[in-house]
Image: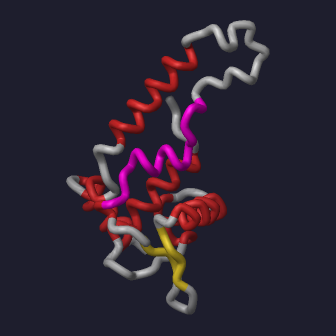
Amino acid sequence: MRLSLYTDFSLRLLVYLAAVPVGKPVGARLIAAKYQVSGHHMQKVAQGLRRLGCIESVSGRNGGLRLAVRPEALRIGDVVEAMEGAGCLVDCAEGPCMLQGACLLKVAMDRAERKFFDELRNYTVADMLRGPTVARLERMMRAA
């Protein structure tokens, strides 16, 4: 299984915002620059995370993005499922597939995908701020 770049950036954005002092907004382009990724893509990701209610925008001169939910409440599996969608590993409608409706491959893949999301639900965004991750994020934030 491979996560889309959109999901990857979503998780990176959430982890970054979780490391910022509570309530301090940060611009999507600044976060993108710190991760050395596309600012345009990061802004699209921010829009998606706002629609999900994970982050919020703060307007004004010192505006930007901040978490709308405590990092302890943001489950990685929920975010990944929301970004990737469920039941997408095998698309029986695309084909043609002569086995459609008589094949257990879709069932097996959907069950595996569900277990994948369930395992990721054991972790929160706050959990990602432990160990070397938080030290690296702090260095990134201090860098010019």
79 within the magenta span: yes
Q: Quadrant of residue 46?
A: bottom right
Query: Which image quarter: residue 96?
Result: top right
Asked if residue 136 can be seen in this view, the reply is no
Q: Is residue 90 above or below residue 18?
A: above
How would you classify the magenta stretch by its main secondary structure?
Answer: helix
Which residue does the image show at 22% across and 55% down from the upper left?
130
Image quarter for residue 105? top right
Question: In the shown orientation, is residue 132 left or right of residue 67?
Answer: left
Residue 14 in sight: yes
Q: Is 51 on the left-hand or right-hand side of 94?
A: left
Residue visible at 29% across and 61% down in the picture: 72
Name the one closer to the observer, 51 or 143: 51
Q: Position of residue 108 (x, y in %)?
A: 49, 17
Q: Position of residue 18 (x, y in %)?
A: 35, 66
Left or right: where does residue 114 sit relative to residue 90?
left
Residue 82 percent coordinates (x, y): 52, 49
Rendering coords of residue 36 (x, y %): 52, 58
Instruction: Give the residues in magenta.
Output: 73-88
Q: Residue furthest front?
A: 101
Along the horizontal axis of the image, is 28 left or right of 94?
left
- Residue with the most extreme bottom position: 61
Toward the left, the furthest residue is 131
Identify the colour scheme used. Answer: secondary structure
